[in-house]
Amino acid sequence: MSYTVKAVASIQEIGQQVWDSCAHPTGTEVDPFVGFAFLNALEQSGSVAAETGWAPYHLVLESEAEETVAVMPLYLKSHSQGEYIFDYSWADAFERAGGSYYPKFLSAIPFTPATGRRLLSRSNELNDYLSEGLRTVSEELGVSSVHLNFVDQEQWQALGKQGWLQRTHKQYHWLNQGYTDFEDFLSYLSSKKRKNIRRERRDARANDIEIELVTGSDIREHHWDSFYQFYIDTGNRKWGRPYLTREFFSLVGQHMAERILLVMCKRAGSYVAGAINFIGDSCLFGRNWGCIEDHPFLHFEVCYYQAIEYAIDHKLARVEAGAQGEHKLARGYLPTQTYSAHWIAHSGFKEAVDRFLKEERIHVTEEIDYIEQYSPFRKT
């Protein structure tokens, strides 16, 4: 059987039923970020658009009967911002050598460093057709490179066999070992770490802070109004350009509220801080946090400890708390490898990047091994 690959400029051209049948075929776990609702909210809210440097260019794989059997979230990028995997040095080196690094293709979830499938097909046998079609489209368009960020390990390994360059990275994830409650989890930590965490949790609420967990139909627009204040404050202080619009939060609240957990903090009757999490079938994904008042340890309580408690109560296998953050180690989050795959058109530049990545992969492995020596868990 032969297949045809085409590109579309909006996920709505594909439609929710068709997209989700590829994103979540029978027997696979639901990943809230690759579903139609999340990606469409990004586009409809203007958070993702050519004007922001994220032009949608989603791929569709069609059978001879013109049936869509696979899709891929894909963006034509005019910069490298909002990706959490850094290739600025690659862009600088390529352009100093006289090349044009941008535009490039990126298959990832915008502004979201969460691991997942990027080749979304009804059957794994179709993934090779989709990735080959991606390279063909890239060559025809003349982009410098293609990047699949935070791709799951299985697809990463398959892409490596096809000649894609392989890169590894480090995040901190919390793993559920079948704990019965938070105290059971603490019992596996060293005595000093247990005491520190209990103290942090106590001090986080010291200024009459009340914590609310809000999900599903209980989420209202006033929650989004407050949370957006927190998001904007954090974005302005850290990056200077918050990408997500206010409308984005309303849209995900309307279309996927059952996959959202808001942890909101009140003081004197007003919300002063909060974090948004997205709920997968086996993972709680911590995303954005913000506050309009500073309170000691409140960030740790809201983003890390509340997430652990929720995962234990709902029997989720892990918590992914986002990018970076060595401070997560002392709170039970362990270093974990994440993966990206890269295709580069220029043969000489590809060879240089390949050499760099081989050395970098060794460094990442050594770094994780070193950090694990300082695990907060008791030695048994």
Image (spheres, grey):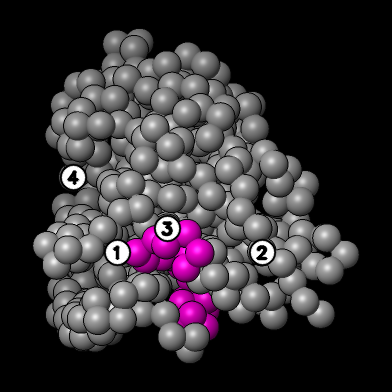
Determine the secondary structure under disc 1: strand
The mark found on residue 199 in the picture is: 4
| Camera-side residue of 39 and 30 | 39
The image position of residue 239, as x and y in percent, is: 20, 37
Q: Which residue is mark 1?
A: 171
**Residue range (magenta):** 138-160
- Residue 361, picture quadrant: bottom left
Q: Which residue is mark 2?
A: 5
Looking at marks 2 and 3 on the same chain, the residue that comes earlier in the sequence is marked by 2
Q: Residues within 10 Å of mark 3 (few under 14, many from 20)?
A: many
Q: CA distance from mark 1 to mark 3?
A: 24 Å
Q: Which residue is mark 3?
A: 105
Q: CA distance from mark 1 to mark 4?
A: 25 Å
Q: CA distance from mark 2 to mark 4?
A: 56 Å
Q: CA distance from mark 1 to mark 2?
A: 34 Å
The image position of residue 40, as x and y in percent, is: 59, 38
